[in-house]
Amino acid sequence: MVLYADPPPPIKPPEIKIKELANKSTYESSMMEQKTRLHAIERHRSCEVSQAILSEVENRHQHQTLEPIKSPISGCSPSVESTTDTNTVHRHTVADAAWEALKKSIVHFRGQPIGTVAAIDKSQGALNYDQVFMRDFVPSALAFLMKGEPTIVKNFLLETARLQLREKMVDLFKLGQGVMPASFKVHHCNSKHKTESLLADFGETAIGRVAPVDSGLWWIILLRAYTIWTRDNSLAESPECQRAMRLILKLCLSEGFDTSPALLCADGCSMIDRRMGIYGYPIDIQALFFMALRCAVTLLKEDHNDDFVYQISRRIKALSYHLHSYYWLDFQRLNEIYRYKTEEYSETALNKFNVIPESIPDWIFDFMPSRGGYFIGNVSPARMDFRWFCLGNFIAILSSLTTGEQAEAILDLVEERWEELIGEMPMKVCYPAMENQEWQIVTGCDPKNTRWSYHNGGSWPGKLVHLQLFVSCG
């Protein structure tokens, strides 16, 4: 069943007359001719290897075996074709060290594993890094599932569902019941009797005092991953998990003043938990929202007394249409936006958000290749955030928010702009970085988010692990 609406037919743009774009298109076309054959060979080979690996993962899952996966192409580890014994030994050494570090990070509650701490490095002040973060545990949870150790994931899902029911107060204001914690830790109440309890942070002690919008979305997605990998529906069908899902979704689907199906968010409400100008409708949250909705449709037990699943299905279609229509950017779409008329007052207006063409940043004309495209960072009245966000675009591919052509275009963009988006480091969380006066105004002179650092164009290998493990889990 198709759960998203097809994007509307593109409007034929006027003949390109922008000198900069025309010159750039001609230059890139000539360069593309030199690269086309090489790209085609590399992409074809990459797809063959990836398909073979995923087929082997699925086969292992079906037979519930835990032996190391061997590449059907070369007989070696699926991540890289080993050419020497030294490389193989090094790879296994790194993997073993990673598993040892992961085991050391496990947190126990009343004798049972319940999650992993954010960091085990105690060289500096711990702050809240000694806690189990909802979003940060997801890659660990997927690794445990693939290792054949689902107990810790099950315990995590159940305990956080119980934490959700607690009363949440920030000063004198009560938060919605569906809010999931950003993090939690084990509190030893009485050392003599060894009693333990969980202390959860719903935003009341977080830096910036912002409730996490993404925690509940990640929770639903992880529940779906657990159900698929273990083939055990009993957890998802339990009263605790059914109630938790409904509370999360009722909060997200509640009616308000919005004229958009996208989820309204404050700055700092997600993995980017500091002021970075993502207030409004950030693509990272919208892609997660879409994925969580699709997971919920398969997990919720339909109650014939309400139309909750039907509401979710309608929201999926509306959200898909909205993101395809207003967030997708490619070379043709950029030309259309550049020629936008403003102050249009009608239902047939093309510039529905009254975006001023002069607000288009200069860097986008050099960044946007004639081959490729992506979902921009944010759209709201008189504002389009053209920044590239890694998590939102790749989650869009994994959740089937993108069409096949759009998924290919995102990968083409990464390939064409490899130096900018990856370079010598892992994939940057966003591009470009803010600096100088823009950094001062948008981040509030945040010393942690200086250019190419932390959330401001920094690299987050953990987020790449999210994506890699989701692919491996099928």
Image (tube, rainbow, N blue to C red):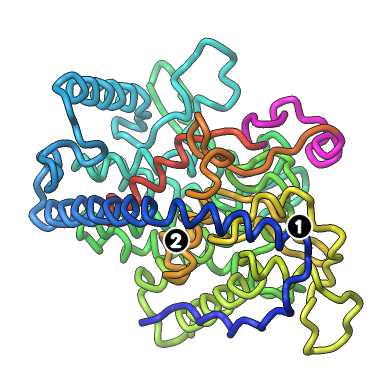
Q: In the rendering, at what x and y percent does residue 236 appear? A: 32, 62
Q: In the rendering, at what x and y percent does residue 101 appear? A: 33, 22
Count all numbered tags in the image, as a single digit: 2
Boundaries of the magenta span:
437-456
Q: What's the residue at 59%, 61% (across, down)?
A: 370
Tag nearer the camera, 2 or 1: 1
Q: Could you classify mark 1 by the number of other residues whose Cα lies within 10 Å: few (under 14), some (14-19), or many (20 or more)?
A: few
Above or below — where is 184 with respect to 365?
above
Question: Which residue bears the numbered disc 2?
Answer: 397
Q: In the rendering, at what x and y percent does residue 342 appear? A: 89, 75
Identity of the amino acid at label 1? Glu
* Observer-nearest of 193 and 274: 274
Return the residue found at the far right. 343
Above or below — where is 293 with respect to 455?
below
Spatial distance from mark 2 to mark 1, Cα to Cα? Answer: 31 Å
Return the residue found at the far top. 123
Magenta segment: does it hold 363?
no
Identity of the amino acid at label 2? Ile
Above or below — where is 235 with respect to 123?
below
Q: What's the residue at 72%, 40% (across, down)?
A: 209
Marked residue nearer the N-terminal end (2 or 1): 1
Residue 165 appears in the rendering: no
SS at circle 1: helix
Q: In the rendering, at what x and y percent does residue 104 appear? A: 33, 22
Above or below — where is 436 with respect to 393?
above
Q: Could you classify mark 2 by the number of other residues whose Cα lies within 10 Å: few (under 14), some (14-19), or many (20 or more)?
A: some
* Observer-nearest of 68 and 254: 68
Quadrant where the N terminus is found in the figure: bottom left
Left or right, 63 with reference to 19? left
Question: Which residue bears the numbered disc 1?
Answer: 20
